[in-house]
């Protein structure tokens, strides 16, 4: 701890700083369903424009307390304060994105950042939010698809981006117009990325470094579109939006199940040594294309009705339906590998998706999630306090069919009622919220039972239905100590019901090389969180320090079997050579801190902002004091940003320390450094038209980097040096 204090002192004196916008803490409404209080961070559209198109997790990885669990370049699921998966809700305009990211590390978040107005990040348990189970935090991507205020005539933008590390390109468009009192919105994206390049020597096969630098099956492509229309007035607003997305991404790592590994091996198989078997596993996918295609269609009706100054001032409401599918499949490559760095130029990726994928070598696996959600928020605010009552109902039907159908179809229903209040008490400000959730999970577990040596066996399916009633409450007190210094005390108790996959999963999950087994005896997780924040602001100087303790009782985690366990059951149960992993529960404690410090200097021709940051989180099981798996290592950030008129430039440096706090069975991850540069210039073309060009360089040092939070950190390193350009015309 002493080293950290010394580092803070040294960096405070220096003029370098952290690459994040550390502005004043903002109280924000998330699509008006509820109030979001500290800790909130806003990522503005101008900040997103300076970054290359990437996954959601990677786009937020430079925020203190926020990380990414990557699975190649196309997939990066966000992590907040050491918690991930279903503990973090991803929202679009305040509504939960109901994809299948939570049941697979190789599944992407169905979100598009290309035309976002801003991204709102709330760190820590967030029971005040209109979403249950968010004991890690929330990420809300805000766009203008359903306008709440009238557009001022016609406006829009056209953008184009190129990236060198993956020979990729991105085209975007956005149009807004008010016609006859109606607000029309249209946006979309078209992207095409080939396999990305890593620093030489970073790809390891059979525990040996190779000269290979291209991560095979790491390509991706996407087409998205969104249309919205709304009507506003003194009475409120009403609008609807339709969004559609089609994506394809390669899967750079894939385990293999060996069917011949049952308890009835023949003599030849029994004599096969381990080295021969490992070679066989690698050869099985040689020359094979492994990829996934996703499709989503989302309809949203949203509005607000003003009722005057009575008991109920306003009613907000929404209805959304979504259909999401992900199909994973294998296909034999035709001819030479199309992703070879010398041959991929000028090839038609879209055509390749159809032609190359003909003749699948294995039956595809289809993941689907169909959901409907309806909610209403009643505003009861008066002169003394802001207060709201919310009601929400959601229904989700999830199914998996095909080669990797590791879970039977499930049905979930959620009903929520909550009360939210905010008011001043003397010189302090109080925020309070309480929410009750009633959650039902219906599903089944299939087991294969062998009758005798002469029969393959009989599958038995047992149905289950579980009902969980959870209570969540949060209390936050903000007190100004001086005109420059304030303190925020937050206490939250939030519960998360077990997810369908945690209860009912029972089968091979090749993306993690595991045979994952759910647990029908799981209890809801209960998070008791306390965090303290000190905020300082004096002219151009700003600082924030947050320390938190999050006790999660009955923490649910996936635990790999030990070698001893494997030897005990391998004669009775076969899992095709995959590692058996069970969903278990144990009390866990997460502790950490986030520190940010910066200063803005007014120069003759512009503003120079220098910032620094530190973050750290540690998760341990209370009984054994063993570390929780895949925890983010400590990180240090520094950045310089210069803005003047039509020009801006930035330098950011991130140092990720080695992760030596290892869970049972984990391997150590080396530290690495990331140095990034960007510069933008705007040109006024007249008639309200502006042209803006941006150049960026990511990983300038071409560092070999492995993300400790990734399931495939050893097999799939992060990308090497990436030089790119962005062009955007706004009008």
Image (cartoon, rainbow, N blue to C red):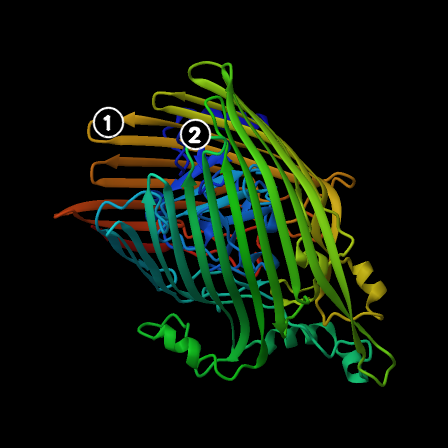
Q: Does the image show residue 413?
A: yes
Mark 2 is surrounded, within 10 Å at the Cα level, by few (under 14), some (14 to 19) or many (20 or more) other residues, namely few
Query: Which label is found at residue 309?
Result: 2
Residue at point 82%, 80% (across, down)? 264
Q: Which residue is mark 1?
A: 603
Q: Secondary structure at mark 1?
A: loop
In this orientation, which residue lies closer to the viewer: 212 or 255? 255
Residue at point 81%, 68% (across, down)? 570
Residue 221 lies in quadrant:
bottom left
Check the image and report above or below for 226 versus 356. Answer: above
Residue 594 in picture, x, y percent from top left: 52, 33
* Horizontal side, residue 199 vs residue 268: left or right: left
Q: Does the image show residue 560?
A: no
Residue 537 in picture, x, y percent from top left: 41, 22
In this orientation, which residue lies closer to the viewer: 69 or 210? 69
* Horizontal side, residue 99 vs residue 354: left or right: right
User: Sequence-wise, which precedes: disc 2 or disc 1?
Assistant: 2
Q: Secondary structure at mark 2?
A: loop
In this orientation, which residue lies closer to the viewer: 508 or 625? 508
């Amino acid at each position: 701890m002493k080293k950290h204090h010394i580092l803070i002192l040294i960096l405070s004196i220096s003029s370098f700083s952290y690459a994040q916008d550390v502005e004043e803490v903002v109280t924000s409404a998330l699509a008006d369903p509820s109030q979001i209080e500290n800790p909130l961070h806003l990522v503005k559209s101008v900040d997103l424009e300076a970054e290359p198109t990437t996954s959601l997790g990677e786009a937020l990885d430079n925020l203190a307390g926020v990380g990414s669990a990557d699975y190649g370049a196309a997939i990066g699921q966000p992590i907040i304060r050491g918690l991930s998966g279903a503990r973090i809700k991803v929202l679009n305009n305040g509504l939960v994105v109901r994809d299948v990211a939570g049941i697979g590390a190789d599944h992407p978040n169905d979100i598009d950042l290309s035309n976002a107005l801003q991204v709102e990040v709330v760190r820590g348990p967030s029971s005040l939010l209109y979403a249950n189970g968010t004991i890690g935090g929330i990420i809300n991507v805000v766009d203008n698809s359903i306008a709440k205020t009238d557009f001022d005539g016609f406006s829009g933008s056209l953008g184009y981006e190129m990236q060198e590390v993956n020979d990729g390109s991105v085209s975007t468009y956005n149009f807004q117009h008010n016609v006859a009192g109606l607000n029309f919105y249209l946006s979309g994206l078209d992207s095409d990325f080939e396999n990305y390049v890593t620093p030489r020597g970073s790809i390891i096969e059979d525990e040996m470094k190779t000269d290979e630098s291209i991560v095979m099956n790491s390509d991706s492509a996407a087409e998205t579109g969104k249309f919205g229309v709304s009507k506003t007035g003194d009475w409120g607003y009403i609008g609807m939006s339709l969004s559609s997305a089609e994506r394809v991404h390669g899967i750079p790592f894939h385990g293999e199940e060996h069917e011949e590994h049952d308890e009835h091996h023949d003599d030849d198989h029994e004599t096969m040594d381990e080295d021969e078997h490992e070679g066989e596993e690698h050869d099985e996918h040689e020359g094979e294309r492994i990829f996934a295609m996703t499709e989503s269609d989302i309809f949203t009706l949203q509005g607000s009705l003003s009722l005057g100054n009575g008991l109920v001032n306003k009613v907000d409401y929404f209805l959304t339906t979504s259909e999401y599918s992900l199909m994973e499949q294998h296909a034999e490559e035709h001819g030479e590998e199309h992703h070879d760095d010398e041959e991929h130029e000028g090839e038609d990726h879209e055509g390749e998706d159809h032609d190359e994928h003909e003749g699948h070598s294995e039956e595809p696996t289809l993941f689907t999630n169909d959901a409907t959600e309806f909610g209403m928020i009643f505003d009861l605010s008066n002169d003394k306090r802001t207060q709201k009552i919310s009601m929400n109902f959601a229904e989700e039907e999830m199914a998996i069919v095909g080669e990797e159908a590791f879970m039977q179809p499930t049905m979930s229903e959620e009903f929520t009622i909550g009360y939210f209040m905010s008011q001043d008490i003397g010189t302090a400000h109080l925020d309070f919220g309480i929410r009750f959730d009633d959650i039902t999970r219906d599903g089944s577990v299939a087991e294969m039972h062998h009758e005798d040596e002469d029969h393959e066996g009989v599958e038995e399916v047992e149905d289950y239905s579980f009902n969980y009633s959870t209570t969540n409450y949060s209390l936050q007190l903000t007190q100004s100590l001086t005109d420059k210094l304030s303190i925020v005390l937050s206490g939250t108790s939030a519960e998360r019901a077990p997810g369908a996959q945690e209860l009912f999963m029972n089968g091979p999950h090749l993306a993690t090389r595991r045979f994952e087994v759910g647990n029908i005896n799981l209890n809801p997780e209960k998070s008791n969180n306390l965090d303290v924040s000190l905020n300082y602001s004096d002219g151009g100087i700003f600082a924030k320090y947050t320390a938190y303790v999050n006790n999660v009782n009955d923490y649910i985690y996936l635990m790999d079997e030990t070698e001893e366990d494997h030897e005990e059951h391998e004669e009775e149960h076969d899992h095709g050579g995959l590692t058996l992993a069970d969903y278990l529960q144990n009390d866990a404690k997460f502790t950490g801190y986030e520190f940010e410090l910066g200063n803005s200097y007014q120069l003759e021709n512009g503003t120079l902002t220098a910032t620094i940051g530190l973050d750290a989180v540690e998760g341990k099981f209370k009984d054994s004091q063993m570390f929780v798996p895949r925890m983010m290592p400590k990180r240090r950030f520094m950045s310089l940003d210069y803005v003047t008129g039509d020009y801006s430039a930035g330098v950011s440096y991130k140092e990720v320390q080695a992760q030596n706090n290892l869970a049972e069975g984990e391997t150590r991850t080396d530290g690495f450094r990331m140095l990034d540069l960007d510069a933008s210039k705007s040109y006024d073309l007249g008639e309200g038209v502006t042209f803006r060009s941006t150049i960026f360089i990511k990983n300038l040092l071409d560092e070999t980097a492995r993300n400790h939070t990734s399931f495939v950190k050893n097999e799939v390193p992060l990308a090497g040096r990436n030089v790119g350009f962005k062009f955007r015309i706004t009008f």
